[in-house]
Amino acid sequence: MKQGTKQIMGLVLVSLLSSGATIGLYSLYTNSDTSKDQRSIENYSQPVSFTSTSKTPAFQTDFTDAAERTINSVVHIQSTINQTTVSRGGQRDPFFDFFFGDRGGYQMPQQKPQKGFGSGVIISSDGYIVTNNHVIDRSDEILVTLDNKKSYPAKLIGTDPSTDIALIKIEAEGLTAIPFGDSDKIKIGEWVLAVGNPFNLTSTVTAGIVSAKARNINILANAGPMRIESFIQTDAAVNPGNSGGALVNIRGELVGINTAIASETGNFAGYSFAVPINMASKIVTDLKQYGSVQRAVLGVQIGDINSEMQKELNLATLDGVYIGGVVERGSAASAGIEKGDIITAINEHPTKSVSELQEQVSRYRPGDKVKVDYIRGKDKKSASVTLKNQQGNTEIVKQLGIGNLGATFQPVPNDLKAQLGIRSGLQVKDIDSKGKFAEAQIRKGFILLQINNQRINSVQDLESIIKEIRQGSANEQGMFIMGVYPSGKTAYYAINLAE
């Protein structure tokens, strides 16, 4: 298939808004403006037949009400990662040497805390707070400070790197929860406010307009094939520390979670991006209710349509998503959708791009039925599609199981960390009698501290290490685990993932 004409793009740095975090490059149009300054129309004589128009704005642009309604719902987040370094000295552990080898002397771990800052939004009066995953990723401690300067330790409820959304909770009551708006209804050119804590300052409000919707800036490229980018683009000034803060409409309703900026310096340079709240709300609901995101898939390979592609394939429209392939027995295939069809809407919501299609599907769970409008040849069609999960069924997974380990996991409670004198770890919540953890005689409650000499602090850490191990040859797929039980007993286990 021929490639569309490449767009000439200016290279700019895309930064996540947590303090100092920069993750990639992408392009934006650059147009040189060679036009002369426009002169005021008052400098010209007007024909007698002209009538001056009213200069009254289309609607009130007083932002004070919206600011007052939201500023108490936005919090400051400090995340701490306790990096461990090893030096000579201390007492040798023969079991550690057996599993991980001689490290060249006695081992004495030392903690070097690394702090990061961001923002969060209170979504319930009992302390649930939504933020960005990159704000709290791999953190050992999370501290939340309210607008009234009161601080609380926070517990991680769950994360979704695929959308850069995370849910945390503090033990507090009577908090001011922000009202949710409808991100589908916001329009390009509409006023919005960004509320957050840039540069580690206290709550700050800036204003701008919606510049674009359903933007894919490829900022989550490392989040895996299930990543979903359909950002709201605005020109409201946001800076490092704004990550996880609120994007609100003129009525003070939450319409997005501020996530990234486009910049050459790491600071605001004209563009910012937010996760639409209609997508984020489904993510946090899943994390709260099930402990993991219930992700539905259509089971199709899709691509955007350009004019050259339309001409080459004789497609009926540019406004849709082209299906380059379907998964056998997947959601779409089971409903009769085929390769070559063009999806134009999901439940009456137009899907003119891959980003829009992904955003719409992300709002549903396995087992949900959606109406899919599509074009085959010149004919308009529709189908009722029962969405499935990645495993090809409609089951709801209440906790995340990793591969065939036969276990589910949860963050280690802060009080248990303090009791055991540990700064990281991932606790086994449940054990399946048929899994590898059960075969290795690992028991419920065990806290994973290290696997193959790599620290474990989250499900994402565990998944990453397992993926790395399985890329090796069959005789190199050993997983050597060091951890501790709540009783304080240290334990070591070896699991062969190749078996």
Image: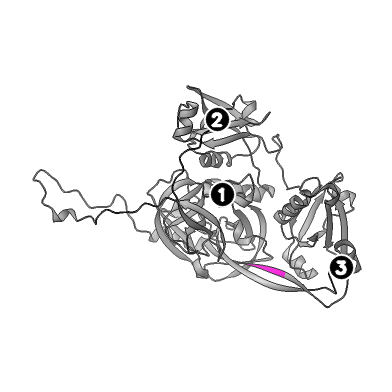
Magenta region, mostly helix, strand or loop? strand
Which residue sits at x=87%, y=68%?
A: 102
Q: Which of 405 and 150 is in front in this view?
A: 405
Pointer 1 residue: 280
Query: Residue 251, image x and y in percent?
Result: 41, 53
For residue 138, which quarter of the picture? bottom right
157 above or below 142? above
Query: Tag 1: Cα neighbours inside 10 Å, few (<14), some, or many (≥20)?
Result: many
Left/right placement of residue 322 relative to residue 298 reads left
Q: Give the CA separation, mark 1 to mark 3.
A: 47 Å
Q: What element carries label 1?
A: helix
Pointer 3 local density, CA inside 10 Å: few below 14, some 14–19, many at least 20: some
User: Residue 45: x, y in percent?
Assistant: 10, 51
**Position above or below: 89 against 5:** below
**The one of 49 and 343 positioned closer to us in this rendering:** 343
Q: Is residue 126 visible?
A: no
Q: Label 2 near label 3: C-beta < 8 Å?
A: no
Q: Which amino acid does label 1 sit on?
A: Ala
Question: Mark 1 or mark 3: which is in front?
Answer: 3
Which mark, residue 102? 3
Residue 121 counted in the magenta span:
no
SS category of the residue bearing label 2:
strand
- Counting residues from the start of the chain, the first of labels 1 and 3 encountered is 3
Going by the numbered disc 3, the residue's amino acid type is Asp
Of the numbered discs in the image, which one, if any, rests on residue 371? 2
Residue type, mark 2 in image: Lys
Depth check: 264 or 184 in front? 264
Residue 99 image point, x, y percent: 88, 61
Start-end of magenta stretch: 79-83
